Amino acid sequence: MALLSTRGRIVLLVVLAAVPAGLSAPRVPDDVEAVLARWVDPAWASFDEVIARYVAAHAFANWTAYQGHGLRAVWRSVAAALMVLRVEAARQAARAERTIDAALLIEAIRQSDLLLRHLADRQALADRWNQLEQLPLITQTTEAQRHGEP
């Protein structure tokens, strides 16, 4: 599994920026790439079914479908759920100082949902996804290519 891409980092920053003042957004570990490589990625594939169900739940019960203005906005919110889950898995593994396991993944899912469903202002997120939706697709591709992504 690839570490956090440039797009993944941007999506994560958008989510964290949607947490209103006065609420505490989780902190991304400075060494998130190293934690992912050491304690998350070696076991990540063993949880494919659980992760797929988590992402599917975010696609199915997706308020961006109602507050957003297009499929790319919905896609971004689903991608955000996966990015947040990966970072939360890294936070849990680092805290426990061990490879991600079922118990740590459950806590990562809980913390991801806390951020995405309760802390982040969903209208602020939808507005941001909508702004990105308005960019021409060619601009998005060019930006991704500038950062070495396909």
Image (cartoon, helix red, strand yellow):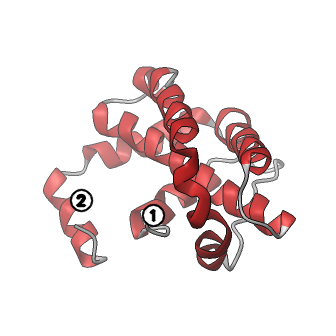
Residue under the point 69% across and 63% down:
90
Residue under the point 64% across and 39% down:
116
At label 2, which amino acid type do we have? Gln
Q: Is residue 14 visible?
A: no
Q: Is residue 79 visible?
A: yes
Residue 54: give x, y in percent of width and height.
Answer: 56, 34
Residue under the point 45% across and 64% down:
1
Q: Earlier in the sequence, mark 1 or mark 2?
A: 1
Q: Can you tell which of label 1 and label 2 is closer to the viewer?
A: 1
Query: Which image quadrant is residue 88 in?
Result: bottom right
At label 1, which amino acid type do we have? Met
- For the residue labelled by badge 1, is the local secondary structure a helix, a strand or a loop? loop
Residue 148: give x, y in percent of width and height.
Answer: 27, 77
- Rendered view: 140 above or below 54: below
Residue lying farthest to the front in this orientation: 46
Residue under the point 33% across and 29% down:
69
Residue lying farthest to the left in this orientation: 138
Q: Within 10 angstroms of label 1, few (less than 14), some, or many (20 or more) residues?
A: few
Query: Which image quadrant is residue 36 in?
Result: bottom right
Residue 84: give x, y in percent of width and height.
Answer: 60, 51
According to the picture, the residue beneath numbered tag 2 turns out to be: 140
- For the residue labelled by badge 2, is the local secondary structure a helix, a strand or a loop? helix
According to the picture, the residue beneath numbered tag 1 turns out to be: 1
Residue 65: give x, y in percent of width and height.
Answer: 41, 24
- Rendered view: 35 above or below 52: below
Image quadrant in which the C terminus is located = bottom left
